């Protein structure tokens, strides 16, 4: 399992750094993906089964489950204008499908900037991701900018509920890195962590920078980000819960020991 994690990190790191280099930084924040807290309540979700698995009906249910609704085209565009960039087509209001592109890329959006619009789908059984709208804070997850903070599974120290999907986006100042340190860890154990799991992404979304998936009882090792952003994703399925987890993250000043300008410029 640990070997697999290391392999994943090695495979994804080159790509992440390359991608990071292509982005700039703004207001003291390295901007390598989405600025969710500024994205006017719009966020992207995929099915628990993976990418492009949601029918229109299921997409509505995913947003509703978290107290939101499908984003409208205007909400998605408003979010895009302030930096919301996701390279995955999803359902939004009234059965339209598309995705928001901020930075043109060859492999995403056909070099176009704007909402890549697949139009109103006649066939609502097609499977895509989804764009939800929920301006209110969620019960779990959220955007965190404090230099030090304790994060925990929903309901901790009680057992976490079934059917949770939580995203914690940590965003610190440019020049800082994020060190995760686990305090408690008890997530339903299975061989490949398919049922319940916590995932770490060394980026500001859950698409790039996958750095590990964890379940079971062992405290994961400390993790140090390469940049000033990180995403944690927690999922629990519809059966068997466990004690949950608690971790602390702390800002590590990176100005001295890793002045690798090539990574950030
Ligand atoms: C609608 O889309 C689904 C999923 O792609 C496909 O299986 C089905 O055949 C389509 N139905 C029609 C009428 O095209
Ligand atoms: C990083 O290195 C560059 C070039 O050597 C230098 O100009 C810059 O001041 C350094 N930054 C920090 C924070 O040390």
Image: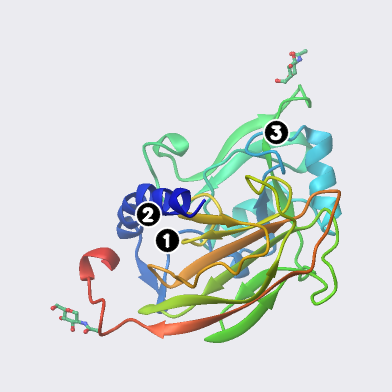
Q: Position of residue 48 (x, y in %)?
A: 72, 44
Q: Going by the image, does 177 lie left or right of 39?
A: left
Callout 3 secondary element: loop
How crowded pointer 1 is (Cα within 10 Å; few <14, some 14-19, many 20+) is rated as many
Of marks 1 and 3, which one's residue comes earlier in the chain? 1
How crowded pointer 3 is (Cα within 10 Å; few <14, some 14-19, many 20+) is rated as some
The residue beneath circle 2 is 16
Q: Report the image quarter containing ligand 2.
A: bottom left
**Within the image, what quadrant is residue 13 found in?**
bottom left
Q: Going by the image, does 222 lie left or right of 265?
A: right
Whether tag 2 and tag 1 are in contact, CB under 8 A, the answer is: yes
Image: 55 above or below 33: above
Between the residue at mark 3 and the residue at mark 2, the CA separation in whole angstroms equals 25 Å
**Residue at mark 2: C-beta within 8 A of ligand 2:** no
Viewer-side residue, 29 vs 224: 224
Q: Position of residue 175 (x, y in %)?
A: 35, 79
Image: 99 above or below 168: above
**Residue at mark 3: C-beta within 8 A of ligand 1:** no
Between the residue at mark 2 and the residue at mark 1, the CA separation in whole angstroms equals 9 Å
Q: Which mark is residue 32?
A: 1
Image: 249 above or below 159: below
Of marks 3 and 2, which one's residue comes earlier in the chain? 2
The residue beneath circle 3 is 53
């Amino acid at each position: 399992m640990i070997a697999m994690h290391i392999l994943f990190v090695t495979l994804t790191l080159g790509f992440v750094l390359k991608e990071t280099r292509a982005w700039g930084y703004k207001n003291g924040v390295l901007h390598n993906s989405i600025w969710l807290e500024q994205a006017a309540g719009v966020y992207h979700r995929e099915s628990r089964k993976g990418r492009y698995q949601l029918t229109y009906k299921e997409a509505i249910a995913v947003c509703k489950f978290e107290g939101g609704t499908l984003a409208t085209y205007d909400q998605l565009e408003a979010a895009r204008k302030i930096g919301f960039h996701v390279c995955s087509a999803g359902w939004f209001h009234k059965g339209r499908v598309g995705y928001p592109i901020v930075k043109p890329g060859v492999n995403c959006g056909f070099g176009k900037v704007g909402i890549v619009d697949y139009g109103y789908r006649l066939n609502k059984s097609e499977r895509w991701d989804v764009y939800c709208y929920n301006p209110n804070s969620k019960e779990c997850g959220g955007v965190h900018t404090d230099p030090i903070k304790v994060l925990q599974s929903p309901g901790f120290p009680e057992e976490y509920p079934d059917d949770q999907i939580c995203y914690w986006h940590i965003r610190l100042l440019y020049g800082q890195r994020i060190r995760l340190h686990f305090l408690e860890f008890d997530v339903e154990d299975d061989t490949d962590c398919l049922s319940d799991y916590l995932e770490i992404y060394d980026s500001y979304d859950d698409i790039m920078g996958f750095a590990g998936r964890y379940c079971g009882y062992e405290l994961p090792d400390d993790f140090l980000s390469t940049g000033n952003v990180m995403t944690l994703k927690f999922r629990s399925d519809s059966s068997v819960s466990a004690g949950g987890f608690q971790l602390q993250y702390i800002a590590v000043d990176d100005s001295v020991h890793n002045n690798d300008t090539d990574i950030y410029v």
